[in-house]
Image (cartoon, rainbow, N blue to C red):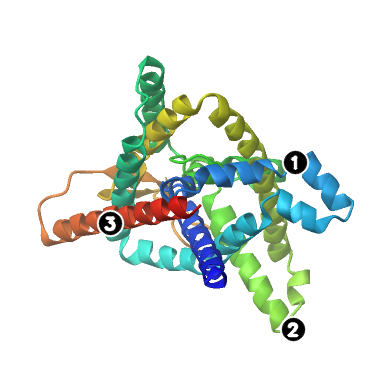
Amino acid sequence: MENTRTFNDKLFLVLKGLAMGAANKVPGVSGGVVAFVAGFYEEFIYSLKKVNAKAFKLLINGRFKSFFRYINGRFLGLLFLGMIVSYFSVSKLLDYLIIHYQLYVWSVFFGMIVGSIYYISKGFSDWKNKTLISLGLGIVLGLSISFLNPAKENDNLLFVFICGIISVSGMTLPGFSGSFILILLGNYVLLLVDSVNALYDTISDIFSGNFSFVSNSERMRMLKVLAVFTLGSIAGLVTFSHLLSYILKRYKSITIASIIGFIVGSLGVVWPWKRTIYKIEEGTFILDSTGEKIIENYERYIPDLSTETYYAIAFILLGLVIVVGLEIYGQKQRKHA
């Protein structure tokens, strides 16, 4: 029975990673919200905090088992495995669904975020002047970010490294969408589409015995960009986890209130009824390297009552049901812990 339970724990950790990876890929959605609602946010932050000088000392001294136990390696390893698999599977499916069923995908995520707000605020009762101000600031900041216009693409490696640090914030800070921040920085397509596709093509070439990509300057440039972005993301994960661990320990109520505010503010990004505005230059759409139009921002509107609108509302309710399911699962996990 214990072995079955252990296997189930491992499987659910991978599934949680899949959900976080998919959420991080979608602009406006935060992987941190998944961690928060599913009940493993604090374990995630405190596990990342263990990646410190002591952990590296254990690693350098060859004490791999001690290192693995110290950083909660099984938890982090399976979670990140799910995220990596997500980037090559679930996130690809999401890309397809957003292109062909955009309204319904946004509706599901909108419902999930509304459910998340209810779930998180339900368990929080420490409302006073400081936490109400934190809530208000979180909402204002979240909404302000929602309506900013993106910058131009920039493949400077130092800037790419900074993008990695900033973008990973969506994993550690619920309501703060790292992928949407990348859109604002102008590098969403470069870092989460073009470079990931370059890695996918490279892996395929290696398995087929084709190493001609080594002489492909564009492919090598994209792999270099992805490597620097990954290093920035790792640096950001470790840095943010230490910072958030410190803040959660000393200012937990203010932090939770701010997180609720961030999530409320993020509703502006995932509002389902919006028209896409593309970058236009001298009457011509600006295209990315794959020939796709580059998104400038969104024009939001109130929908008319129609069959499509009723379907969208049904998908919003589906999003709420998903969050309720995650909450029930999270409660069971905490009881068994």
- Disc 3/disc 1 C-alpha distance (Å): 39 Å
- Give the residue number, with chain letter if any, for mark 2: 209
- Give the residue number, with chain letter if any, for mark 1: 52
Label 3 secondary element:
helix
Q: Earlier in the sequence, mark 3 or mark 2?
A: 2
**Residue at figure coordinates x 33%, y 53% from the top left:** 323
- Disc 1/disc 2 C-alpha distance (Å): 39 Å
**At which x and y percent is residue 46?**
61, 41
Amino acid found under the numbered disc labelled 2: Gly
Vertical comparison of 57 with 293: above or below = above
Vertical comparison of 194 with 137: above or below = below
- Give the residue number, with chain letter if any, for mark 3: 321
Label 3–label 1 contact, CB within 8 A? no
**At which x and y percent is residue 151?**
51, 39
Amino acid found under the numbered disc labelled 1: Asn
Q: Earlier in the sequence, mark 3 or mark 1?
A: 1
* Label 1 vs label 2, nearer the camera: 1
**At which x and y percent is residue 54?**
80, 41
Q: Residues within 10 Å of mark 1 (few under 14, many from 20)?
A: few
